[in-house]
Amino acid sequence: MSDSHSAQAKQYWKENIRTVLLLLSVWFTASFILGILLVDELNTIRFFGFKLGFWVAQQGAIYVFVALIFIYVSAMNKLDHKYQVDEDQDDYVPDEDYYHIEESKAE
């Protein structure tokens, strides 16, 4: 994908944005909807001795956020591999070749 305007690059970014928007919607649901808007309704349910709304706002959302990080990494690795832009495809260049420094002859 050397040309950023190629059809493959456009498809890659379309899938990338779709993945990000999906994960952001889960984040929004866990933090704002469940943790703020529906907290009173969730508080009628007990979870490990705590009101569920309180637990979701204080602990559950954090678990969701951490899970989203791992899901994002996994999804992006699969997407990168699908479009052959993953780091595994990078050409390895030894340091000696990359940092080729000619020794100057002292006279």
Image (cartoon, rainbow, N blue to C red):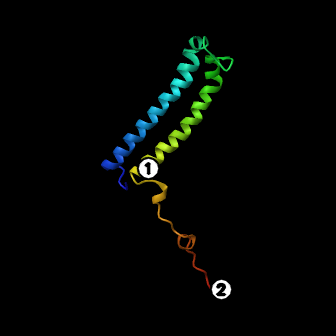
Q: Say whether residue 5 is visible.
A: no
Judging depth in this view, the residue of 62 and 91 nearest the camera is 62
42 relative position to 85: left or right: right
Extreme-bottom residue of the structure: 107
Secondary structure of the residue carrying numbered label 2: loop
Query: Residue 2: image x %, image y %?
Result: 37, 56
Q: Amino acid at mark 2?
A: Ala
- Crowding at dot 1, Cα within 10 Å, few <14 / some 14-19 / many 20+, comes out as some
Secondary structure of the residue carrying numbered label 1: helix
Q: Residue at x 47, y 64 (%)?
A: 91
61 relative position to 10: left or right: right
Q: Amino acid at mark 1?
A: Asp
Looking at the figure, which quarter contains the C terminus? bottom right
Q: From this view, report whether residue 71 is shown above or below residue 45.
A: below
Query: Residue 94: image x %, image y %?
Result: 54, 70
Query: Residue 44: image x %, image y %?
Result: 60, 11
Which residue is the site of mark 1? 80
* Sequence-earlier tag: 2 or 1: 1
Q: Are marks 2 and 1 in contact (CB under 8 Å)?
A: no
Q: Residue at x 36, y 48 (%)?
A: 9
| Camera-nearest label, 2 or 1 | 1
Looking at the figure, which quarter contains the N terminus? bottom left
Q: Residue at x 39, y 43 (%)?
A: 13
Q: From this view, report whether residue 8 is shown above or below residue 55.
A: below
Q: From this view, report whether residue 19 is shown above or below residue 53.
A: below
Give the spatial CA distance, label 2 vs label 1: 49 Å
Which residue is the site of mark 2? 106
Q: Say whether residue 3 is visible.
A: yes
Q: Residue at x 42, y 46 (%)?
A: 79
